[in-house]
Image (cartoon, grey):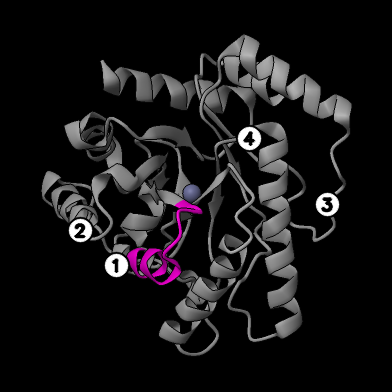
Amino acid sequence: MALQRAADLGCTTMQIFSHNPRQWDVKPLTADAVQQFRSARKELGIDPVFIHTSYLINLCSANNEVKEKSFRLLRNELDIADQLGAEYIVLHTGTAHTDATEALRDAARGISRLAAEQRWDAKILLENTAGERGDLTSKISDLNLLINETGSDLIGGICLDTCHAYAAGYDLRHSKGLESLISEIESNMGIDMLKLIHLNDSKKSVGSGVDRHEHLGEGEIGISGLGNVVRHPKLTNAAIVLETPKATEEDDIKNLKKVRSLLK
Ligand SMILES: [Zn+2]
């Protein structure tokens, strides 16, 4: 139903979970479900498709069992993406319990192990985080470090979440903050690596390190800051997906209307 819902909302791209993101066990997809998804997608023209990976994945857990389970779940996410023909899976690499540099190396080792298998068409997009409770990759340079340490095209690029960036200290209320974020991307992995923007407003203040998404224009970044993001000529090649709060069906309609008005 996800594809039809996206099309009904007038969307040309979408992000889904391929299973319950808070459970380790993943029920395999039936051949029938895969077939239905692929044909509906072709018919509705939703492209690209992003799969957000499970919240349980932590490639740098201090617990080796969790680390190994995370690795296997990530592999499963890639398998499902290929089954469905999804182009990208979006990944938060994990949470550091001790040293952040060591944790980043751990995460890179996990991704490198997968990259060595060389068997997926789908690519991984690394998402920036708010840096809450030791979450890795709140800085663009951290994302770049992972890309470089892994050295594989299994990582297809990055996903920029505006709420996370703001909470991590990138002041997107004004053009100046956005310009400095863009130049950081340019000087690290390059702007072509930016494949996806999670367009969210932020409930919490700049640099708070707290990840609380808000409706567009109702948070701290505000409508003019978000307008600068969607209209920036260097960002127009990235797909845009909303992860704004949803209590009723109206919420998505309202937020999508706002983005479209910003793009006019
Ligand atoms: Zn996000």
Locate residue 178 relative to residue 46 in the image: left or right: left
Foreground disc of the pair 2, 4: 2
Read off the residue under disc 2: 184
Q: Position of residue 66 (x, y in %)?
A: 73, 76
Label 1 element class: helix
> Type of residue at label 2?
Glu
Residues at circles 2 and 4 in contact by the CB criterion of under 8 Å: no
The residue under the point 33% across, 64% down is 144
The residue mark sitting in front, 4 or 3, is: 3
In this view, the residue in front, 216 or 164, is 164
The numbered mark, 3 or 1, whose residue comes first in the sequence reads 3
Q: Which residues are magenta?
A: 144-155
Q: Nearer the viewer, mark 1 or mark 4?
A: 1
Label 4 crowd bin: few (<14), some (14–19), many (20+), radius 10 Å:
few
In the picture, residue 45 is in which quadrant?
top right
Residue picked out by circle 4: 247
Amino acid of disc 4: Ala
Asked whether the residues under the numbered discs 3 and 1 touch, taking CB atoms below 8 Å apart as contact, a structural biologist would say no
Q: Which amino acid does the dot numbered 1 rest on?
A: Ser
